[in-house]
Image (cartoon, grey):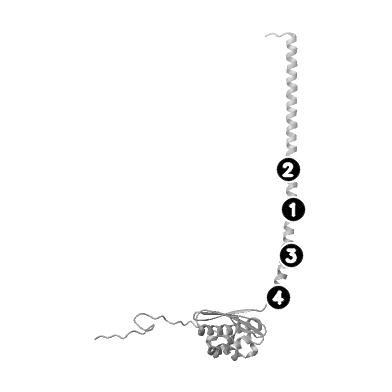
């Protein structure tokens, strides 16, 4: 194919324009790549700065929390010390006989002794009141002069309740002296009570055996005739 001069000139112009366009495209791609690299670097720097700030803030928060916890622990210790100093001296003991349970609360006072909110003189039957006074008479009134003893009793009958009361009372004196007074006085009181009557400090596990058929009691049997 033969081309005219005008056609050849056009072809040359087109080639120049294509070359120019290619050069522009290549330059644009290089600029875009460089901008992308710069953006990545900036993003990395921003991330590092953010991590540093977050780490610093976390460290500051931890320090603040530690300080707050230390302050709270110190306050709690002070409060517990104050509460321990303000706590009243109190001892609770239990006395048992059959199904009767007596709870004695012993604390410093003026020598009060009450059972279910009433004085000992109101307990029935009056013959058994002496059983309650036994530990007081053994140890002496001086041991009870500075103490308030309140006893609550429930269950079973009169006699078993009286035995439960005297046991709770004697246990309460021993426990109070062991906790707030002295170990030597506690040993002396315990020895005196154990020498007089062991049931003042030790519960009696004995129970009545139930009646069986074929007799009038637990073991007795009706008379048997062979003829």
In this rendered view, identify the residue nearer to me: 115 or 77. 115
Q: Is residue 137 above or below residue 148?
A: below
13 relative to 185 in the view: left or right:
right
Quarter of the figure with residue 210 = bottom left
Residue on which disc 1 sits? 57
The earlier-in-sequence mark between 3 and 1 is 1
Q: CA distance from mark 4 to mark 3?
A: 22 Å
Q: Is residue 51 above or below residue 72?
A: above
Picture coordinates of residue 96, whole percent (x, y): 53, 81
Q: CA distance from mark 1 to mark 4?
A: 43 Å
Residue on which disc 4 sits? 86
10 Å neighbourhood of mark 2: few (<14), some, or many (≥20)? few
| Contact between labelled residues 1 and 3, with CB atoms less than 8 Å apart | no
Q: CA distance from mark 3 to mark 1?
A: 21 Å
Residue on which disc 3 sits? 71
Q: CA distance from mark 2 to mark 3?
A: 40 Å
Picture coordinates of residue 19, whole percent (x, y): 74, 21
Quarter of the figure with residue 67 = bottom right
10 Å neighbourhood of mark 1: few (<14), some, or many (≥20)? few
The earlier-in-sequence mark between 2 and 3 is 2
Residue on which disc 2 sits? 44
Q: Quadrant of the N terminus?
A: top right
Picture coordinates of residue 135, whole percent (x, y): 58, 88
| Contact between labelled residues 3 and 4, with CB atoms less than 8 Å apart | no
């Amino acid at each position: 194919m033969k081309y005219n001069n005008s056609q050849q000139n056009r072809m040359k112009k087109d080639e120049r324009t294509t070359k120019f366009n290619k050069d522009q495209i290549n330059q644009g791609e290089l600029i875009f790549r460089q901008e992308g690299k710069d953006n990545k670097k900036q993003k990395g720097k921003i991330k590092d700065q953010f991590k540093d700030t977050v780490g610093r803030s976390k460290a500051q928060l931890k320090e603040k929390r530690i300080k707050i916890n230390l302050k709270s622990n110190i306050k709690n210790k002070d409060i517990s010390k104050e509460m321990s100093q303000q706590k009243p001296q109190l001892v609770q003991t239990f006395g048992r006989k059959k199904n009767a349970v007596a709870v004695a609360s012993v604390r410093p006072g003026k020598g009060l002794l009450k059972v279910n909110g009433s004085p000992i003189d109101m307990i029935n039957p009056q013959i058994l009141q002496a059983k309650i006074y036994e530990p007081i008479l053994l140890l002496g009134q001086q041991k009870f002069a500075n103490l308030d003893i309140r006893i609550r009793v429930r269950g079973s009958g009169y006699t078993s309740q009286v035995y439960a009361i005297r046991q709770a009372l004697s246990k309460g004196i021993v426990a109070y002296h062991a906790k707030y007074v002295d170990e030597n006085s506690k040993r002396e009181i315990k020895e005196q009570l154990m020498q007089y009557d062991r049931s003042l400090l030790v519960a009696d596990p004995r129970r009545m055996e139930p009646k069986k058929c074929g007799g009038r009691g637990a073991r007795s049997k009706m008379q048997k005739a062979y003829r």
